[in-house]
Amino acid sequence: MDAYHPSAKFHPGRADTLVVYCSDSRIQAAVQEFLASSLNLGGSYDVLAIPGGPQSLTLIEYLPKLSWALGKWLRFLVDAHELKRIVLIAHQDCGWYKQLPFHLFGSSDPRTRQEDDLRRARRSLAGDFPQVLMDLYYVTWDANNRVTIEAVAG
Ligand SMILES: [Zn+2]
């Protein structure tokens, strides 16, 4: 029987951070490097990788079951793993946004829309988890596929 033995070891301790971001394959390597090297998380953090990342938290009226499910998973992880920090990440050219009805958004600029949604998601989470730190980031890339990840203020 074939078996693979990763060089990475099992982490016996619990991480204190949850990262919520998009499933999009194009950003995975860059985001994982950012989490390991810039946020110093190494390979130790909980992950919810779903289409649109944290955006579904803002869909309480349009897709309430989706919003409820994401909230439920978040609550489970924060409570069961005693998490102290949640990192919310959005990215340019997100396919999830392209299938949402336009009337949901207050801005016609895609980045502004997504940054507004990150802030709305944080507000919604802050009500449920006032003790948890939250950081927001936005991922972009240029014509040469060089990635930039910036903190979202406000
Ligand atoms: Zn996406």
Image (cartoon, rainbow, N blue to C red):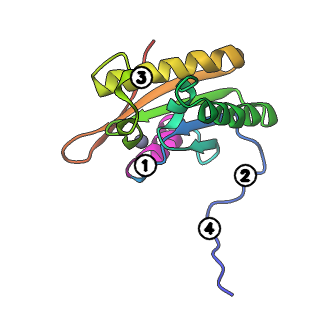
Q: Which mark is residue 126?
A: none
Are the residues flagged by discs 1 and 4 in contact, CB closer than 8 Å?
A: no
Q: Which quarter of the figure is the C terminus placed in? A: top left
Is disc 3 surrounded by few (<14), some (14 to 19) or many (20+) residues within 10 Å? few
The residue to which callout 3 is attached is: 104
Residue 30 within the segment the image draws in magenta: yes
Depth check, front residue: 37 or 75: 75
Depth check, front residue: 138 or 16: 138
Q: In which quarter of the image is ligand 1?
A: top left
Q: What residue type is labelled 3?
A: Leu
The residue to which callout 1 is attached is: 24
Q: Distance between the residues labelled 3 and 1?
A: 22 Å
The residue to which callout 2 is attached is: 11
| 23 w.r.t. 138: above or below | below
The answer to which of marks 1 and 2 sits earlier in the sequence is 2
What's the magenta region? 26-39
Of tags 1 and 4, the one toward the viewer is 1
Residue at 48%, 23% (x, y): give it: 118
Q: What residue type is labelled 1?
A: Asp
Left or right of residue 116: residue 17: right
Q: Which amino acid does label 2 sit on?
A: His
The yes-or-no answer for disc 1 within 8 Å of ligand 1 is yes
The yes-or-no answer for disc 2 within 8 Å of ligand 1 is no
